Amino acid sequence: MHETPDFLPRRRDALAFLLASGASLCSPGFGFGAEQSARPAAAPSKPAAADRTAPLLKDVFKSHFAVGMAGDVPGNYSERELALVREQFNAVTPENCMKPSLVHPSENQWRFERTDAFMNWCVENKIAFIHGHTLLWHHQTGDWFFQGDDKAVVIQRMKSHIDGLAGRYKGKIRSWDVVNEAIDDRGDARTAETENLRKTGWLRTVGPEFLTLAFQFARQADPAAQLYYNDYGIEAGPKHASSMVLLRRLLKEKAPVYGVGIQGHWSTRGIPYDALDRSIADYASLGLKVAISELDVTIAGASGGQLGGAGGRREVRPPTAEELQAQADAYAKLFAIFVKHKDVIDRITFWGLNDRRTWRYGQHPLLFDAECRPKSAFWAVVEQANRSIRPAAASR
Ligand code: G3I
């Protein structure tokens, strides 16, 4: 059932105002503070004060799915950035602080300062949906987990890691990435018929059952949490086929998998829209939910979720108008697919906050620019919600 939003400002009016004013949503006094979260009652024909308030993603997509961001908040985020998180998003994922080597650097050492600060901020700011990332990974995982190569010992370490982390935040974290990126990047017609698991310490010491065990341990640690398998590139090609083989096996082994996170690290130069559309339906056919868990669409340079592709803090070339338009078009097509599958998709999370708070710095991948101003892509995304709710009006 859809609610008819009465608060969506006319896109062109609002955008024109923003561009003309040069106003930043991170600037004090602009429209994202709690004090200004009231929406305009109707779409006025000339710029009025109410136009300054951009629609809020979490409200616009309220009847579709949660909309999230990733970041180790509050960290060194500015007040305005934190306000942007609070106002625009209703789901938050810790970008790094819950990764194994950061929170559990050695067997008898836990570092909960950052994770506790993250959780406290989310709870204090009433973030409804906290998604945990990630219990098991091959990267940022101390070698100590695998020392001795003894299967039983490694399984015990895995269990106490999952107990220690998921157990600590039991009841507060709605969903977890239980296993992240277990499928190999190199795939072909032959591997497509197999799980094609990445050669990691987990696979070497425990064998393929490490995934089932991880899901079972997570279920024991927090019985109410929704448990995800999360990966990049699984929407298309041999990696998608392998993900289906893997998930079928996990379900057969009674691993409590709730959903699949399609990370969504894409680029305007090529997004497999049709495959993505089909892959969401494929996962749904297994009885699973889907999250788009790490969304970004770069307009230059590398893309994909593989490590080592991040831009770094180099000199940044501003995006051209054409690049911004191509990005807006790409986001519009993506959200048209997401909206179509809203019954299957629980959450869309952007990987970062704005074009400054992103692992793809310099590649301008998100909906807000470095100064927190909404980009064309923001309005394109909002328009997809508008269309799905009022198709006739939107197509006029
Ligand atoms: O914490 C250290 C800091 O002490 C040190 O001074 C600094 C020097 O470079 O490095 C800091 O660690 C960095 C860490 O992010 C925290 O900022 C690492 O070098 C850097 O490699 C790490 O990158 C993260 C990457 O995962 C690897 O863990 C990115 O921020 C993060 O966005 C990225 O996220 C992954 C998802 O978890 C899984 N899917 C793919 C996605 C993109 O690679």
Image (cartoon, rainbow, N blue to C red):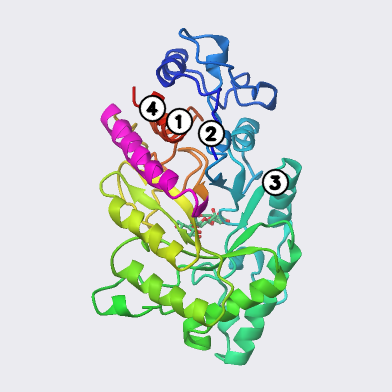
Q: Is mark 4 within 8 Å of ligand 1?
A: no
Return the disc, 1 or 2, that comes first in the chain's sequence. 2
Q: Give the distance between the C-alpha atoms of the residues marked 4 and 2, in whole angstroms.
A: 17 Å
> Which of label 4 and label 3 is nearer to you?
4
The quadrant where residue 308 appears: bottom left
The quadrant where residue 85 appears: top right
Return the disc, 1 or 3, that comes first in the chain's sequence. 3
Q: Which residues make up the magenta segment?
A: 321-346
Q: Where is residue 131 in the image (x, y as percent from the top left)?
A: 61, 55
Q: Which amino acid does label 1 sit on?
A: Asn
Q: Which amino acid does label 2 sit on?
A: Val
> Which of label 1 and label 3 is nearer to you?
1
Assess whether mark 2 and mark 1 are in contact (beta carbons under 8 angstroms): yes
Q: What residue type is labelled 4?
A: Ala
Of residue 112 and residue 376, the one placed in the foreground of this image is: 376
Return the disc, 2 or 3, that comes first in the chain's sequence. 2
* Residue occupying the point 74% across, 60% down: 171
- Pointer 4: what residue? 392
Assess whether mark 1 and mark 4 are in contact (beta carbons under 8 angstroms): no
* Residue occupying the point 46% across, 14% down: 17
Q: In this view, does 12 lie to the left or right of 322?
A: right
Of residue 110 and residue 227, the one placed in the foreground of this image is: 227
Task: Kindly state the secondary structure of the residue where label 2 is placed.
Answer: helix
